[in-house]
Amino acid sequence: MGGMDTQELIEALTGDGGDPGHTVSPVEKLRLLHALSRRADELAGQLSTEISSPTQAALLAHTVERTHRQTEFSQIRAAHTAQRTLVQDLPAQNLEQVRAIAEDPDAFIRSRTALLADPATVPSGLMPFKDTTAFLQGALGLGHFAARDRLHAANSLLPRTDIHGNACGPRYPKLAEQVHAGAARLGAATAAARKLDKLAPSIAAHPEMPDLAGRLEEQVAQSVAAGIPRATNSLFDALADELDNATEQEPSPDEIRAKTGIFVTKRTRHYTWMSMCMLNADAEVFLSHFAASGNPRTLAGNREALASAATGMTPAAGTMADANGATTGGNAAETPDGPDWFTRPANTENDFLEAPAPGPGDPLNGTVPGADGLTPPQRHLQTLLNLMRAPNKPPGKGTTGLPSAQLVIHCRLDTLLGLAKGAGWSAHGLEIPIGEVRRRLATDGVIPLVLGGQSEILDLGQEMRLAPDYMRRAILARDGGCFYPGCTVPPELLEMCHIDGYAQGGRTSVGRMTGGCSCHHHMADNGLLTLLVHNGLPHVILPKHLDPEQLPRRNAFWQRPEATLF
């Protein structure tokens, strides 16, 4: 079979040699793909033990690496096919069968198992997955951002159909060519495509837009193929600056929406990094405040007041107070702690000390404008601008543009009393040192929630249909976010779900309610998910096609390291 091409191989292995008109169906090709995939893995395993020649070993390494890169490209092809065929609309029984075949394909390869037929009519009601990203995340076990990035790569690097139904090439053909040829890794090309998307409004405003877009993509594709990420990042920074200075026209609304706002760029145990981009007129508001605080002759620049207001600072620089008020050096290390319902990840040592950096799809960094035309980062920026421009008096409750912030910190009672090492946690999962918690309890309007040994919240409970604000705060302090595993919807956007339906006699109490986003709340109400209390905490049982084991599960996204005693 040395000179046999792909089509000839398919026909030889699946076709009917006596019928030259035989057409190989997609199902037959799927069976062949399963068989070849298994045989390729077995063949690579045999070669890894049989080869004794270094020349042959080098060829094996090259072959396996090239196969791996081709498989990455096949993954985005599969994601694109799933999106094109609306795979998220399949009923649960089809999804369960597909999962079973993927785990044990022997019967399918031997034609003993036939695939269930697709739905004959357009599905109605609430489906197992709300979109293709949810399918990739739930059915294939991908993370949310990995699933989103795979679809973005498919829509950027694969042939597509325009709004008129005409076939056309990839949005970034030069990047696609580099990936398909094996000259560039898919992850690097996908990241470059996202950055080119951010530059698109500036490129569109340039007078040489048609030629410029191709030239810029050519430069980026060459840099990505070189495999030096730092050089590629520097190239994008230079291109962005050059495009910003290339025209005297005012930025378009699309360009402003794509660039302005406050973005969370990094989080560690004690710090959160943010980057800001704004129009120069808005930047002047910041600069004027900075100038006032830098002048020691003004009230705003009072050095003692600034030092006392700064968090984590004491009159003796470089020291910090321990639980008993004694000062120590800044190198003291304590075992991270958290409420007792948080679970430390298994088989980890120090990696849980650093929170994962939010990606572009993080709720804090969302770039999709809402009904008001503003993206979330733009609202964050406008909040700061409104506060800075406001009269020098506290805003009234409900004042437009001037929200009254409310700080909720929760921690174990034994940690607060100094009986155990640990820290407090904000509603968004940021670690607060226990000394800072005690200081804010004494000076700020902190809402204390007392948590028991099994995370039950004491002295809160009332029989009514809708949970009051104090009960909502208690529930979110326990659960953190949405009950559905992997859901990243922030606590402010959650609804309160009865574990036992209210119409069926379910009680409105902290122990029998949990937080859920609108989508997963409706899935629970419609019977696609089962809510229950397990070990004193709300859990969910997923549909069988997502979790054949049918185990009670909690959302690990909002969980923190468990408490550590002395």
Image (cartoon, rainbow, N blue to C red):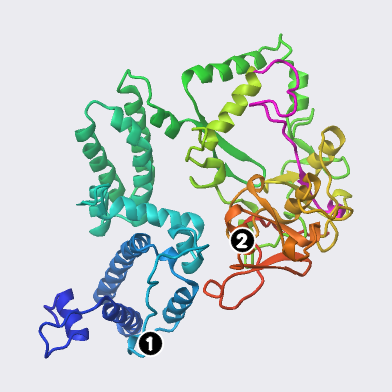
Q: Which residues are magenta?
A: 390-415
Q: Secondary structure at mark 2?
A: loop
x and y, in percent, of residue 56 in the image: 25, 76
Q: Is residue 345 left or right of residue 275?
A: right
479 w.r.t. 313: above or below? below
347 w.r.t. 432: above or below? below
Residue 334 shows up from this direction: no
Residue at left offset 39%, top offset 62% = 86
Residue identifier under label 1? 113
x and y, in percent, of residue 439 in the image: 83, 37
Q: Is residue 317 left or right of residue 10?
A: right
* Mark 1 closeness class: few <14, some 14–19, many ≥20 residues within 10 Å: few
Q: Considering only order in the chain, which callout, 1 or 2, is on the residue closer to the N terminus?
A: 1
| The C terminus - image quarter | bottom right
Residue identifier under label 2? 484
Residue at left offset 76%, top offset 53% = 475
Q: Are marks 2 and 1 in contact (CB under 8 Å)?
A: no
Q: Is residue 386 left or right of residue 41?
A: right
Query: What is the magenta segment's predominant secondary structure?
Result: loop
Extreme residue in the top direction: 297
Question: How many numbered discs sit on the rendered protein?
Answer: 2
| The N terminus - image quarter | bottom left
Mark 1: amino acid: Thr
Residue at left offset 48%, top offset 30% = 260
Mark 2: amino acid: Tyr
